[in-house]
């Protein structure tokens, strides 16, 4: 009885509503994440991490950039926040820090940019 009749939805109104719509948060975050990363080179190269007192963890370098790398170990192990990254094939022997560790996957950041 007191309901107002809804205006019919025209194609023009629908087009305006869809064009004025902001980007979804998921897409906005993806663009900022890609902007903060260096270009990655995907590879499969043996590498090792070492830290005092003489502990060495061997793994596979899955991808690498000038600012960091992603490494996969054979088993889950505790890695300290600061360590040394060695990769003979790539000629990299540099100090690094732990960014993220998910089970056997480790993301690291080099303390100095590396030529890759």
Image (cartoon, rainbow, N blue to C red):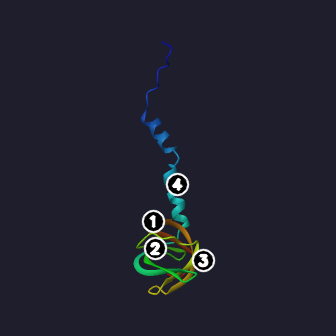
Q: Is residue 8 left or right of residue 35?
A: left
Residue with the most extreme top position: 1
**Residue 83: x percent and y percent?**
57, 78
Per the image, label 3 sits on a secondary structure element best described as: loop
Q: Which residue lies under the disc numbered 3?
A: 111
**Residue 108: x percent and y percent?**
53, 72
Which mark is first along the chain, 4 or 2?
4
Neighbor class of circle 2 (other Cα within 10 Å; few <14, some 14-19, many 20+) is: many
Q: Which residue lies under the disc numbered 2?
A: 71
- Quarter-wise, where is residue 114 in the image? bottom right
Which mark is first along the chain, 4 or 1?
4
Neighbor class of circle 1 (other Cα within 10 Å; few <14, some 14-19, many 20+) is: few
Per the image, label 4 sits on a secondary structure element best described as: helix
* Mark closer to the observer (3, 2): 2
Residue 103 circle label: 1
Spatial separation of the CA atoms under disc 2 and disc 4: 27 Å
**Residue nearest the viewer, comparing 66 with 49:** 49
Spatial separation of the CA atoms under disc 1 and disc 4: 28 Å
Q: Is residue 37 left or right of residue 61?
A: right
**Residue 100: x percent and y percent?**
52, 66
Residue depicted at x 55% and y 75%: 67
**Residue nearest the viewer, comparing 68 with 40:** 68
Q: Are marks 1 and 4 in contact (CB under 8 Å)?
A: no
Which mark is first along the chain, 3 or 1?
1
Q: Which residue lies under the disc numbered 4?
A: 28
Residue depicted at x 50% and y 75%: 65
Q: Are marks 1 and 3 in contact (CB under 8 Å)?
A: no
Residue 82 circle label: none
Q: Are marks 1 and 2 in contact (CB under 8 Å)?
A: no
Per the image, label 2 sits on a secondary structure element best described as: strand
């Amino acid at each position: 009885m007191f309901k107002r009749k809804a205006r019919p939805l025209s194609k023009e109104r629908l087009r305006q509503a869809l064009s004025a719509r902001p980007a979804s948060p998921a897409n906005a975050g993806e663009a900022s994440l890609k902007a903060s990363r260096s270009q990655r080179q995907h590879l499969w190269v043996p590498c090792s991490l070492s830290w005092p007192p003489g502990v060495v963890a061997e793994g596979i370098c899955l991808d690498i950039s000038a600012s960091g790398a992603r490494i996969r170990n054979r088993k889950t192990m505790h890695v300290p926040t600061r360590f040394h990254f060695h990769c003979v094939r790539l000629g990299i022997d540099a100090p690094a820090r732990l960014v993220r560790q998910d089970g056997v996957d480790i993301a690291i950041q080099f303390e100095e940019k590396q030529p890759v």
